Image (cartoon, helix red, strand yellow):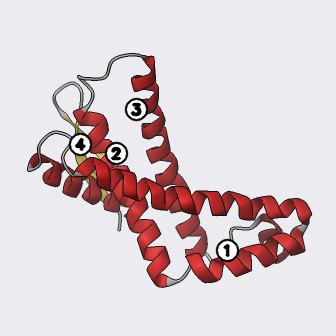
Amino acid sequence: MSAAALLPAASGGVVFVPLGPLGLAALLAAALAWGTARHLRRGGALRPWHRASAMVIGAFALVHVLAHLAALAGPAAHQAVLDALRQVYRHPVAESLLLASALFQVGSGAVLLWRGRAQRRGAVAWLQALSGGYLALFLLVHVSAVLQARVQGLDGCAYTDKATG
């Protein structure tokens, strides 16, 4: 069963967009962030929470990239580092915090992107907004792919998948 959403179109109509489970969760996170933002003054409490979720994601991303750099030492070293780190970030509490942060980041980022559209001035402001939009898309696609790989029983590591695939 696939979820779908009717989203506003630039023409004033609506667009039917099919959503997977992660897309639906992101849409719900955006709706929650939007509803919360409506009750706060401009800039209110949404921005600090957006930054906090970015710090959680940034800390994970740094460790994630460093773990994959271990592949330079060979497949065995890479797998050993991944196995050690997965004990931490695949713990249900850590994983829930990370997924919630990613979904909140996408939702709150969409709200901030939309709210700031009229006030944005200069190339740097637009570059920041566009890079944030790209990052939101990347998070949705990457997290969806990782979760789908797990459902299919894949490890996600190129060495392991080739050995077992």
Crowd rating for badge 4 (residues with CA inside 10 Å; few <14, some 14–19, many 20+): few
Residue type at numbered disc 2: Gly
**In the displayed image of the protein, which residue is found farthest to the right?**
74
Q: In the displayed structure, does residue 140 sit left or right of residue 78?
A: left
Callout 3 secondary element: helix
Q: Residue 154: give its label.
A: 1
Q: State how far apart marks 2 and 4 are (Cα).
A: 17 Å
Q: Mark 3 or 1 closer to N-term?
A: 3
Q: Nearer the viewer, residue 134 or 94?
A: 94
Q: Mark 4 or 1 closer to N-term?
A: 4
Which residue is identified by label 3?
Answer: 129
Across and down, in percent, residue 12 comes to 16, 28
- The residue located at (85%, 74%) in the rendering is 163
Q: Mark 2 or 1 closer to N-term?
A: 2
Across and down, in percent, residue 156 comes to 68, 68
Q: Nearer the viewer, residue 58 or 25?
A: 58
Q: Mark 2 or 4 closer to N-term?
A: 4
Nearest-to-viewer mark from 2 and 4: 2
